Every structure is written in C-alpha cells, then in structure tokens.
Amino acid sequence: MGLIKLLRTTAFRFFLIYFVLFAVTAALAVAYIYWQTNVLLAVQLENAIQAEVQSLDEQYRTGGIDQLQRTIAERSETPGNSLYLLTDAEGHRLAGTLKTVSPDLWNSEGRVAFVYRRPAAGGSEERLAYAVTFRLKDASRLIVGRDIEDRREFGRVVRSAFLWSLGGIALIGAVGGLLIGRSFLRRIETITETSRQIMAGDLSRRIPLSGAGDEFDRLAANLNAMLQRILELIEGFKEVSDNIAHDLKTPLTRLRNRMEAALRDVRGEAAYREALQGTIEEADELIRTFDALLSIARLEAGASSSAQSAFDLSAVVGGVCELYEPFAEERGIRLTCATAAQAHIRGERQLVAQAVANLLDNAIKYSGAVNSSTPPSNRAISVSVALNGEEAQIIVADHGPGIPALDRERVLKRFVRLEASRSRPGSGLGLSLAAAVARLHGGGIALLDNKPGVKAVLTIRRDGGGHITPQ
Amino acid sequence: MRVLVIEDDAKAAEYLANALRESGHNSELAADGDAGFELARGGQYDVLIVDRMLPARDGLSLIEGLRQEGVRTPALILSALGSVDDRVKGLRSGGDDYLAKPYAFSELLARVEALARRSAPEKANTRYVVGDLVLDRLAHLVSRAGEPIPLQPREYRLLEYLIKNAGQVVTRTMLLEHVWDYHFDPQTNVIDVHISRLRAKIDKNFDRPLLHTVRGAGYMIRDGAD
C-alpha cells in the first residue's frame, strides 16, 4: 500500500490532530513553568543584591569611601557570582571584580542587565549579568551585581529540552500513526477486497475475521450476516424463477396440448366448447399458482408490517374452522376446534387466516385419502390454539397417512409435493405459504408425527415478529 | 348502466367494453389517467373501472383527485398487484372495490353491478322479501311461506348478503370478502358447501327454488323460474 494512501488514513489524521493539540498544550505548560521560575529567580536575585547593597551601605556610612573600597576588595577575593565595581568620580577603578565597563553601563542608573567578559579557561567568555548602579555623594560610582549567565543557560536548556522532546514525540507519533494506520488500512483493505470480489460475482466470499473480537470483527461479522441474507434472497429469487419455469411450464404445455387436441377433434363445436371450458379452468389454476408464488416471494423478502394489527387468534382460527367445517363434514371428517380462550396477538390477520386455512385444507385432503374402511376415529381433525410465553401456537392434527420423517422438512419448501399427491389438485404451495407466513411472524412450522397422521404446529410470535426479517 | 373504463391497454379495454355491451351496459373508454379524470369529472357515470397503473396519472391518484372534487361515482380498481397491502392502499385512496388481474369477467360484472346498486339511494331496509322468503333485519328472523326458518349466525349473514343483492350474481370471492372478511382464495371451494346447507334450509321443502347457482360465476337469489 502506498505512502500517500497511508498518510490519508483516518489513523494518521488522528495522529496529526493529536500531535498539534499536544504540542500546543505542552508549549503552554513549559512556557508557564519557565516564566514562573524566572519570576522566582528574579525575586531571589533582587533580594540577594538588596542584601549586599544594604551591607555595603553600612560600611560606607561608618567608614566612608575607604572602608567601602576595602570591603569590596575583600569580597572580590571570595569566588562567587557577586560582581562589584567601585570607581572614583573620574571613572578610575578603585576596587571590584569587574575589570572594565561599557560606557552604556557607566552612564546608566538604577537596575540594568549587561554583558561582561570574564576570564575563563583559554581566554575569556561573555556572560550575562544584572546589576544596580549607584552614584555616591562624592560622584564616585558603585555597581553591585550578580552573574546571571546560569539563568540564560537554564532558559536555553528548557528550550532545547522542549524542542527535543517535541521532536521525539512527533517521531514516535508519526511512526505509531503510520503503524496503526497501516493495520487499520490492512483490515479495511481485506473488506474492500472481499466486497470487490463479491461485486465481481463471487457471492460466496466472506470477510475473514481476525479473531480479536474488536470492532472490525463485529463489523465484519455483521457484513457477513448481511451478505448471507442477500445470498439467501438471491437464491430465493433464483429458486422462484426455476420453479416458475418448471411448475408453470408443465401446465402451460398441458394447456397447449389440450387446445391442439381440440382443433384436431372432428366433433367440432361441442369439442371446442369443452376444450375452452377446460382451458379456463387450467388458466385459473395457473393464476392461483402464480399468485401463491408471488405471495411467498413477497413474504420471504420480509413484507411490510403496515398491515399488522392486534386481533384474537382464537377468533380467527375459530372463523377458519367454521369456514371449513361443512366441507370436512361432507367428506365424512369430524373437525373439532378447541379455541375457547382468547389469545390476543399482533400480526397480519389475513395472512394468519390464510395459513390456518392452508393447514386445514391439507389436513382434510390427506384425511380424505384414507380408504373408506378406516374407522371413524381416524377420520377426525383437531385444531387448537395454545399460548406459550411470547409465542402462540396453532396445532392442526389429523389421522391421515402421515408424512415420512425424511420428507417432513422437504414438504415445507416451495413447490414440494410428495409424489403420492402429485396427481391430486393443489399447487403444492399451501404448506410453503403457511411456513412463509409463520416465518414473517418470527416463527415457523413443525410437522410432527401424530401416530398416525400429521400434527402441524404453526408457531408465531405474539408481538407479530417484531418486524424481524425471516431468517 | 353507464360505465367508464379507464384502461391503457387497448385490447383489454375493448374486450371489457364488448363484454359490458353484451351484458346490456353502455361503456366509454379513456386511455390514460388525465383523459379519464376529465371524463369522470364531467360525465354522469354509474361506475368507474380504473386500471391502477396508467400513463399520465396513476389510478389511485386519479380516484383521490375525483374524491377531493366531490365526485362520488363508485370506482372499481383493477390491478396486477394483489396483496392485502395493495388492496388496503387502493381502498384507502377512495376506491370502492378492488379486483386483481387477471380476473374472470363474471367476477368483474358481478362487482360492477353491486357497486352501481350501492350508489343508488338505498332505503334503510329492515325487511327483505324475495317471493315468499322474508328476512327481518330487526328481529333477526327468516321465514318462508310464514314458516320460521332457524339459521346459524353465519348462515343468516350469508342469506342477508345474498338477499341484499337479490336478482344479481354474487361470486364466491364476494361472499368470502363480505360474509367472512377473507381476502384470499381457499385452495378448495369451501363456499359451495355453505351454500348447500343454506339451500337445504330455505329451499328443500318448497317447490320453487330461490337460491340459484349461476354456472361459472356464482350464486343468485331470485324469485322466478330458472
């Protein structure tokens, strides 16, 4: 990855911002400390000079210029930072550590900072000093001062320490920023790379997780889940189109054959009428299949929740039972509904009713398949509603031939009809539609062995699925 | 009955117009939403048949516009979109009935006729009479030739809907929608058995049947020979 790219990473930008903020803060702190120290040192300096001046003043008062000259000469002998110069009125040096003075200093009065030369190893050096100058009564002059070169040195040390450390921080920060930026960039780069491959058509690609469980892993896991969902939807659509191709083409072919046969029929008009009647019926069947397919596709895509409302599930199930009861009775099947208690839930009432209708439809169809010698107890279907915490269950149990354990999962898929029932009417979508409705409501369908027969348990969440898209 | 068909597919519109004429109704055609809107606003029609997806102005906004201008002509929406949601949207926009394409003409005709009847000023009927069959809405009683006929609540509602539309075809889907409030087609024809039961109660012991099956369409209650 290029340096330009690296410098444009968020991590590096963060580093830059933080570096500027830190430098400004540190400069302010150092400046404050430096200033405070200087103030303190200035006070000390002033006090030291004042004390010196006071004691010299005493000497002058008691012994005049001569004693002052002696004292200064004495003090000049002891090494230290104190500076003295005593001259007569003409400017001739009488005593003191300062050998020469500049005319500026000579003419100045009061407190003054100046540079003087002091002998050092291999010549002399320039040093900073601070002094108070006096003009005595006899016009002779006195300068009392202190060498403050150390103070200048202190400032220099602080400044250079500050600059060095700032440089160090900048260097460490830049390297750190680049390293962090690079690791961020690498993680992002894997996501980008994966998304490119997916866009290029390889939908099975997933973003690898680092295993650190950090925010990148969480993001990657979520993106992967999203990709999985998209893949499922796409596969769903593909399945729909495959199924349309298969299960709609078959009846269309039948339709066409029937019409061709009618045209060849020598009976003429009577045959045409018969064929047309059959054609309309087949067309209706096709439309029903197509509608069911579209409904399932819609439901599985996670339909809108705008049609959701609160209703009594028992009443809805009872209503469907009541709708089917005469139909079942006509076929010699006893339909019992145990839906006494109220069961308030949220959901799409029409869809739930349709799902229950489909389950009942199937149960009646399969019970009807039992041959007439079956004892009446086996020609019974029971429907019940049960509340189970957050879930509501609708149980439709028949005593028909049942579904082999191996086929139970399969029949919930779109279009699957057990071979035995291929010849019977129905699009084979009833159970799939019911399953889609259940999933839309955050539940599902389980087909259990009723020994004999099938016990279909349709589970939905009482809050309507909380708008969770089906998994 | 004057019907305005607002449909952009020329073939479908022509088919509808011909079929309506054969059933004894006058119809006019409009090929897009704007033309349909102008005609519906100006003309005196008994029913509007509005395709949902139209050029220039879609069916729903057309009906909404008409309702805002105070045009109350009943409207039947035709649409390729058939989900419960689409239906609700259609009826919310001011449509009076909703039929998903493709449809059987008999279904459309029965619904259009029911709409036209609904728009005619209806007396607050408390008693319906067909031949010697009487349905008393106040007392919730049904009798034929003076003999009371006990009916289950659902049978009563079934008969009430049929008798309100006496002399008109009522389709199975219309019964499902109005008597049961279901907007889906059960996979098997469960309505027929309910009709048989009702027929057994009101027609069985009488010479002249009143509840007729109309082949390929639905049912009709009427007094008179077949």
Image (tube, coloured by chain):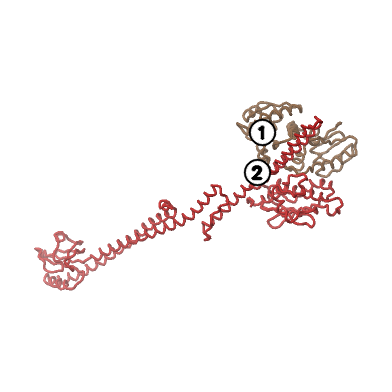
- Chain B, colour shown: brown
Residue that label 1 marks: B51
Q: Which chain carries label 1?
A: B
The front one of A420 and B85 is A420
Q: Which of marks 1 and 2 is in front?
A: 2
Disc 1 to disc 2: CB gap under 8 Å: no
Left or right, A471 with respect to B122, comes to left
Residue type, numbered disc 2 = Ser
Q: Which type of secondary structure does the marked residue at label 1 adopt?
A: strand
Left or right, A82 with respect to B183, comes to left
Residue A139 at x, y percent in the picture: 11, 63
Observer able to see residue A304? no
Residue that label 2 marks: A241
The front one of A198 and B184 is A198
Q: In which quarter of the image is residue A70?
A: bottom left
Q: Which type of secondary structure does the marked residue at label 2 adopt?
A: helix
